[in-house]
Image (cartoon, coloured by chain):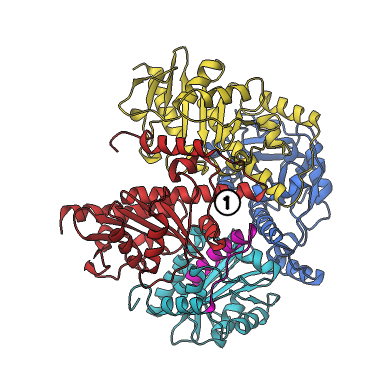
Chain colours: A blue, B yellow, C red, D cyan
Amino acid sequence: MSEVVAALRQTVASLHGELTRYGLVAWTAGNVSARVPGQELLVIKPSGVSYDDLAPENMIVCDLDGVVVEGDLSPSSDTAAHAYVYRAMPEVGGVVHTHSTYATAWAARGEAIPCHLTAQADEFGGEIPVGPFALIGGDDIGKGIVATLSGHRSPAVLMRNHGVFTIGKDARAAVKAAVMCEDVARTAHLARALGQPLPMAQADVDSLYDRYQNVYGQAGR
Amino acid sequence: MSEVVAALRQTVASLHGELTRYGLVAWTAGNVSARVPGQELLVIKPSGVSYDDLAPENMIVCDLDGVVVEGDLSPSSDTAAHAYVYRAMPEVGGVVHTHSTYATAWAARGEAIPCHLTAQADEFGGEIPVGPFALIGGDDIGKGIVATLSGHRSPAVLMRNHGVFTIGKDARAAVKAAVMCEDVARTAHLARALGQPLPMAQADVDSLYDRYQNVYGQAGR
Amino acid sequence: MSEVVAALRQTVASLHGELTRYGLVAWTAGNVSARVPGQELLVIKPSGVSYDDLAPENMIVCDLDGVVVEGDLSPSSDTAAHAYVYRAMPEVGGVVHTHSTYATAWAARGEAIPCHLTAQADEFGGEIPVGPFALIGGDDIGKGIVATLSGHRSPAVLMRNHGVFTIGKDARAAVKAAVMCEDVARTAHLARALGQPLPMAQADVDSLYDRYQNVYGQAGR
Amino acid sequence: MSEVVAALRQTVASLHGELTRYGLVAWTAGNVSARVPGQELLVIKPSGVSYDDLAPENMIVCDLDGVVVEGDLSPSSDTAAHAYVYRAMPEVGGVVHTHSTYATAWAARGEAIPCHLTAQADEFGGEIPVGPFALIGGDDIGKGIVATLSGHRSPAVLMRNHGVFTIGKDARAAVKAAVMCEDVARTAHLARALGQPLPMAQADVDSLYDRYQNVYGQAGR
């Protein structure tokens, strides 16, 4: 096992702790993966295993067709969707899937989350879009994710009647997008529950997105 | 005390930790039981004891009429309902009862939870049904559970004006059903709060249910 | 310091941990007290002290006029209300005050919580009533609590535009009532948010209340 | 590094733990600062660093124009707003910024939170006001905060489509205001979700505010 794969096993296993910390997942219903840079491989959660029991050793390494390369357990049942995204979007280094509650409520109605918050402009650059209904088991979910997010600013898609998929330059960025997606989905839900949120000018959304993507945080991190 | 009973005392005591972890219970209002395979016995929580104080030693062993066989404390006041289910449904190995908030809100209105989420199709195979109002103290609750769940895909029933009962092949499966029931009840509540969730085709619900029951997770677990 | 007072200092300090565990309090806004049996004394939280810093040593002992008898800090600013309840209701051994969110939302509208749940029938015996608006600083809050709860089954009152006071035979029972009050307030809120909860027959409410008060839990506890 | 700065590094780092404890922040989106008394300096969180990783050593010391004086990392991207407040309001010793969910939902609609709760009268002295929409990156947010809070009783402002800023005599007081702001925002949201909260007389609001500011808590703390 290469050192880079060993490091990603550790990263992917521990990043699931952010899904539980922020309450984005129930039981075993959510997963994180990372692309192995420079190799046609990904590292992903095993299927149906409790978050308490995740460890670098039981992460699964698959090729980009979702075939297991290292690991004794079956990979996440969402592996085909993750793999499709890595094949189609070479800039993506991490993928996350959750059924986080508020975001999934928007997905159940098939409604994009309109952008009424500076935090949403920062991270998503505008609305969080809805993807098609698709059945698990083939490439349909992956195709729906890629079709919706290609050329879109948002790193998150609300898959209809299903839940959230997020992408990022690495697994940590995709996890951050999943956390922020639920955060803005919840605030947007509450705002609309008692009336209409005030609109934001497109120029302001653009300005916030540009600044956040290029200035926020520590340079080089 | 047989080894199998000793192991189930441990399992039942520790599974209550999932009820508190997922916020399904307040104070002492919820309980888990397991059937002792091959014996006419069940293991259940003692009545009115704090979740912090549960341990293998204070679990109660009852026969399938709810009569205490081992244990110094009174068994859960819901023991009669658990026992009735084990007598009537030989395939059931675990039963859970909670008043989890969102699911109980649907129960208070006497409304089944319609299936608008793939996660609900996976675990429940369609809607989560409502059972009758029934008073504690005899077989009425047990009869209502069995009448509602017999021949139904759902392992969860919303007992009117009361709360949730779930069943499973073992106690862990029944706890999972209780966790997922609250999760989909909450998402369904939020989805409907701002509009109408989009319908799912029955064929898609059927396909998801079939796949989840037969493919998901690790074989043999 | 008598042994009974020492024990109650421990009990009262540690019971505040249930207020934080169940999310009933923010910052320092909630308090528990206990009557010292057979003495004209009560034990209560100091004012404005963080829940993290509570310990038996910093609990305050007051007489039943709220005058400090033991303790270097000021007692809770709600001490006058607690003391009034102990003077007027000799059967009460514990009092709790919170601004728990859902219950306080009902209090802000001045609406009693109607009884649509078996859990509410068990603990409260029917609706949870509303008390008058009253300013802090004299006996007005205490009078409002006593006027509302005297002769009422409910151990909880929703003080208008303010929050919850609960009573019990001891401090633990009053804390339980505070936990259950928020639990049923939340479920009742959610049930009504999407429609109308189904009514329960008064005879069923009476039967549940009678059973819960006399049969539930462990005898002698 | 002076002793007072060293102590404030510790205070500011640890107070971020209250933001996570009360669920006011997601990922890295919220920050606390303190003025260094008697010096033209402030201590603030570094930008984009996880709350788990905050420590006295990585806090940033800036002058009151937001220029870094001590620290290897970039300061919070909200530093300009904090600095503006300290320049304009000499009585302010602490500033907090969050996107806490319920308060931000009010901010998204541009609605002040009306005062229907004694807890709000105590801490905020009436309504919690709305400030203007302002872009990050210059003095506009700071100006909006100061314009809204100058001469206002409330230590919290809901910045439109953005989130909450709070002020206090020190950082701890500003954190308390942020915690209480979300608490009353949530209760007010729920109260209005099912009807209309009852009005409070202005004289009662005034009386509660006066008492809380002058009597509550421990003298000299």
Percent of width and height locating residue A153: 78, 58
Q: Is residue B83 above or below residue D135?
A: above
* Left or right side of B198 for C131: left
Residue D87 in view: yes
Q: Is residue D186 magenta?
A: yes
Quadrant placement of the C terminus of chain D: bottom left
Residue D67 in view: no
* Left or right side of C78 for B38: right
Q: Residues within 10 Å of mark 1 (few under 14, many from 20)?
A: some
Residue positioned 69% across, 67% down in the render: D108
Residue positioned 26% across, 60% down in the render: C42
Q: How many marks?
A: 1
**Residue designated by label 1:** A22
Secondary structure category for the residue under label 1 = loop
Q: Residue furthest top?
A: B38
Q: Is residue D135 magenta?
A: no
Percent of width and height locating residue A128: 76, 55
Letter of the chain that mark 1 sits on in the rendering: A
Q: Nearer the viewer, residue D177 or A215?
A: D177
Q: Quadrant of residue B206?
A: top right
Residue type at mark 1?
Tyr
- Give the residues drawn in magenta, as a range: D174-202
* Left or right side of A37 for B89: left
